[in-house]
Amino acid sequence: MPPWGAPPSSHLENLSTLQILDLISHHVPYESGARRDFYYLRTRIEEMEVLQEQARDAVEKLDAIVTKLSSPANRVGTLLAMPKTDIALVMCGGEFYCSVDPRLQQSKLLIGTRLLLNEAYAVVGDLGFEAGGPVAKVQDVLPDGRLRLGSETGLQNSVVLRSTPLLKEKLKAGLEVRLDSTGRVALEVVASPTSRDHLLETVPEIPWEKVGGQEEARNAVRDAIELPLLHPELFKAYRHSTPKGILLYGPPGCGKTLIGKATAYNLTKQLRDKLGEDRQEYFMHVKGPEVLNMWVGESERQVREIFARAREKAREGYLPFIFIDEAESILGTRRAGRASNILSTLVPMFCAEMDGIESLHEMVIILASNRADLIDPAILRPGRIDRKVKVNRPTREEAEKIYRIYLTPDLPYAQALRREHGAAAAAGKDAAATSNAAVVDYLVRELMEAQFSRRDSNRFLEVFTRSGRREYLYRGDLISGAIISSIVERAKERAIKRAIAHPGDPASNGLTLDDLFYALDHEYQENDIFPPSDITEDWLKLVDYDPENVVRISPVKPRRAEVSAIV
């Protein structure tokens, strides 16, 4: 037997504690009580080894956490260029030339992408492009491809690089681009909401037949715009200069915008049909107040951008129409004064752009205004806006045509109307359509009589002149296409509500004359709001009444309580 403290046999060194105990167990007699104590010892040692293994795992996890938390943070930078292989120019609080991990595919590292940098400022990862960032407007594209940017918020201009995807795009002044967080790289083009507002993607089909009345205005527009484009050889032979622009003015709701859209549709249609020119209209509906901006020079920039976009579309084969609504808001008369007035610079800018237009073949300029007397004379002089067309309120005959545009035979009319006024006209295979057409004739006649009769119930305004004479304005004096459309729509709404309240009742379905009379009365009652006396002159001009000799006006009917509260 080896002495105590002697080294163990060599074959025991590679065995675990439990394996050694198993070897020793063969030398413990089975019958002795020591064997029971031996197995108890083995169980305790086995439990201790399990606990030791668990403690070892916990210590390893804690070591990993401590190592991770105590290591320096990785930095994120923006790639500006790849001057050499395995070398990147990175913006990360400053510009750094950084080594690139060879395991990264350098061909996929794009200018403007975010890079992950370790504590040694080595590139160890590609995080892709940022999802957000400031937006700026392109003022100029430099010869080397860099962009000069400006901002509406008054910040100074800056020159930035283009990201790799943006190098392939054709950029121009006026576009908006998104920058990275460092402000050094333009990442993508962002659609401008202003550009979308100005552009009407498709002009609706509005043949001249759908423009009720306004024969004089329609003919004047067609003579001024259509003839020079459809017969250029005659204008050249007579050396007759073509107008550059046209002004549509008159009371609100009488069809100025509708005539502008109809001009765009019909002119391009005739160019295609008669001259064989494959040209599409590009209708830019510019709302005057939207051009105004609090920042100095921004409104002028928008005017330049509108004309620049129109010229670009003309080069692409389109026929651009610039329709400026509420023109007096941005082209108003300039007044002398010490106070800063945006019109003092905006009007000359518009004049300069108008002077740069050679003919209607380049673009068509149409101004619309309720108050042409407020537009600066420099805009309206010959050579810029050559034609001024007044869009008057419709006459009785024209109002009848407008009613027939909205009251069509295919609408559901009441059975009683069809039975009483359509039965005599109904015959043949188109009996239903003929019957409804007769009903429409009856309804329009009754509406004309109710709206244009000079009876006391139709008086809405009393006018006192300097001569002491007293005149009255009637409902028919305030008629417009917008009012007629609103009357018909209000009558349809009443008929729909009645059909919902009485489902399955044929007698309750369909438009009636009572619906139209109800709509007529309520339309004028809701618009029975009169201005204070100090702006009477302006208000009379809007209703197309000469205010020169007017002393005062007063409503014929007493104001309602809610109207008085508003006024």
Image (cartoon, rainbow, N blue to C red):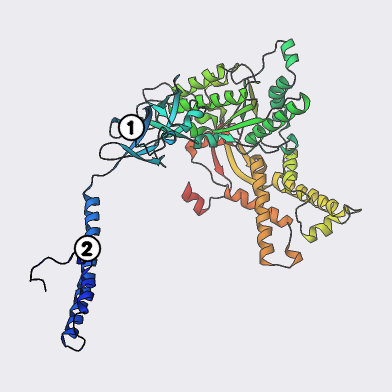
Foreground pick, 320 / 279:
279
Foreground pick, 73 / 230:
73
Residue 465 visible in image? no
Image check: 10 left or right of 204?
A: left
Q: Position of residue 55 (x, y in %)?
A: 21, 65
Instruction: Give amino acid for label 2.
Output: Arg
Image check: 149 left or right of 380?
A: left
Choose top left, top right, bottom left or bottom right for residue 201: top right
Please, what secondary structure does the residue beneath circle 1 have?
strand
Q: Position of residue 350 (x, y in %)?
A: 52, 22
* Number of residues whose C-alpha sits closer than 10 Å to that of mark 1, classed few (under 14), some (14–19) or many (20 or more): many
| Residue at horizontal 21 percent and vertical 65 percent from the top | 11
Mark 2 to mark 1 CA distance (whole Å): 43 Å
* Number of residues whose C-alpha sits closer than 10 Å to that of mark 2, classed few (under 14), some (14–19) or many (20 or more): few
Q: Which residue is mark 2?
A: 56
| Residue at horizontal 68 percent and vertical 50 percent from the top | 488
Q: Vertically, is 517 above or below 460?
A: below
Instruction: Give amino acid for label 1.
Output: Val
Q: Which residue is mark 1?
A: 90
Residue 110 visible in image? yes
Q: Position of residue 418 (x, y in %)?
A: 82, 57
Q: Residue furthest front?
A: 1
Image check: 203 left or right of 340?
A: right
| Residue at horizontal 67 percent and vertical 17 percent from the top | 242
